[in-house]
Image (cartoon, rainbow, N blue to C red):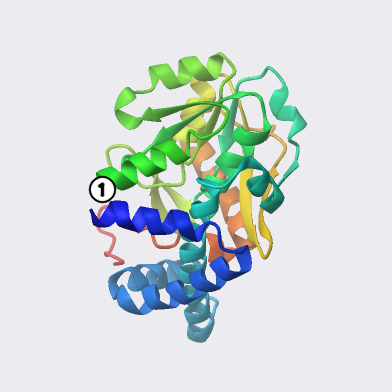
Amino acid sequence: MFSALGLGVLRGLGYLPLSWLRALGAGLGQVLLVAIPSRRRVVQTNLRVCFPHLSEAERDALTRQTFVHFAQAWLDRSWLWHRSAACIQSRVQLTGDVAALSDEVPTVLFAPHFMGLDVGWTALTLNLPLHFTTIFTPQSNAAVDAWVAKGRQRFGNVRLFRREDGVKPIVSALRQHALLYLLPDMNFGPSESIFVPFYGEPAATVPSLSRFSKLGRARVAPVITRMTETGYEVVVHSAWRDFPTDDAEADTALMNQRLEGFINTMPAQYFWVHKRFKTRPSGAPELY
């Protein structure tokens, strides 16, 4: 009941001018910063580990900005998933090596967890007459789960795989030139992850980017989404020429290294609310 009502209100907010919605998001972010101290501590811990050179005041400011961008990106789904294609195209710029995606070459799109990751997916599926797939993580709330799934299937020729679908159908689609929009900068626990450096700290990371590109005989092209004052910019980067190799651990370490470079250009827009270092190497102290 509450979820249905909340989603209805969110849909209505999508018709506000973007500047108003962003201002509302800024206020909501400040509220969440205070109202959810456990998540605030997660962000602060991540920033302390990854940016030890910053002063405490600088990290506090970055924490506040992170919560603001988190709230703004969440509210932006109100127009991203409910307004017209024309509205979305007026607010989202798709730039970079876009034309290369039309080559009939198996391609994994490396889409790290920046706040606008859903915007990147929508921009691609709306603007390109290609087949796209991604891996969908179910939400705990049934109403929210249905809303997210519907929002991600609004445009184009798309397929959402669930993790329980396994690797085979994903690789099969990839080999048939469906572009795989992959978010591999995650920790799914010790059984599915390997430890590689992330900002110099061992981080359990799924080696799926290396694995899928290897199995699918696919190139890897990063897709990075940046929130701007007028909406978003989605940049398709050129495919990496040195990826994958025969060493999944080295590939995953390289992925994290290059991810750091993207994060450093907009640190407040990365998904620091996630417990990136929850799984620890044997004998390492807990961070959270």
Q: In which quarter of the image is residue 160?
A: top left
Q: Can residue 200 be seen in this view?
A: no
Binning the other alpha carbons within 10 Å of mark 1 as few (below 14), some (14 to 19) or many (20 upward) gives few
Question: Quick check: 51 above or below 116?
Answer: below
**For mark 1, what is the residue?**
141
Q: Where is residue 274 in the image (x, y as percent from the top left)?
A: 38, 58
Task: In this rendered view, identify the residue nearer to me: 84 or 281.
Answer: 84
Q: Residue at x 28, y 71 (%)?
A: 38
Task: In this rendered view, identify the residue nearer to me: 104 or 139.
Answer: 139
Q: Where is residue 209 in the image (x, y as percent from the top left)?
A: 50, 34
* Image quarter hosting the C terminus: bottom left
Total numbered labels: 1
Q: Is residue 98 left or right of residue 34?
A: right
Task: In this rendered view, identify the residue nearer to me: 133 or 271.
Answer: 133
Question: Quick check: 17 above or below 3?
Answer: below
Q: Which residue is drawn at 50% across and 72% down?
A: 24
Q: Residue at x 32, y 37 (%)?
A: 192
Q: Position of residue 138 (x, y in %)?
A: 31, 40
Q: Is residue 134 left or right of residue 231?
A: left
Q: Can residue 69 be seen in this view?
A: yes
Q: Is residue 256 left or right of residue 1?
A: right
Q: Position of residue 136 (x, y in %)?
A: 39, 36
Task: In this rendered view, identify the residue nearer to me: 163 or 158.
Answer: 158
Given the current orientation, which residue lies at the most extreme bottom position? Answer: 57
In the rendered structure, which amino acid carries the disc numbered 1?
Asn
Question: Quick check: 152 above or below 66?
Answer: above
Mark 1 residue element: loop
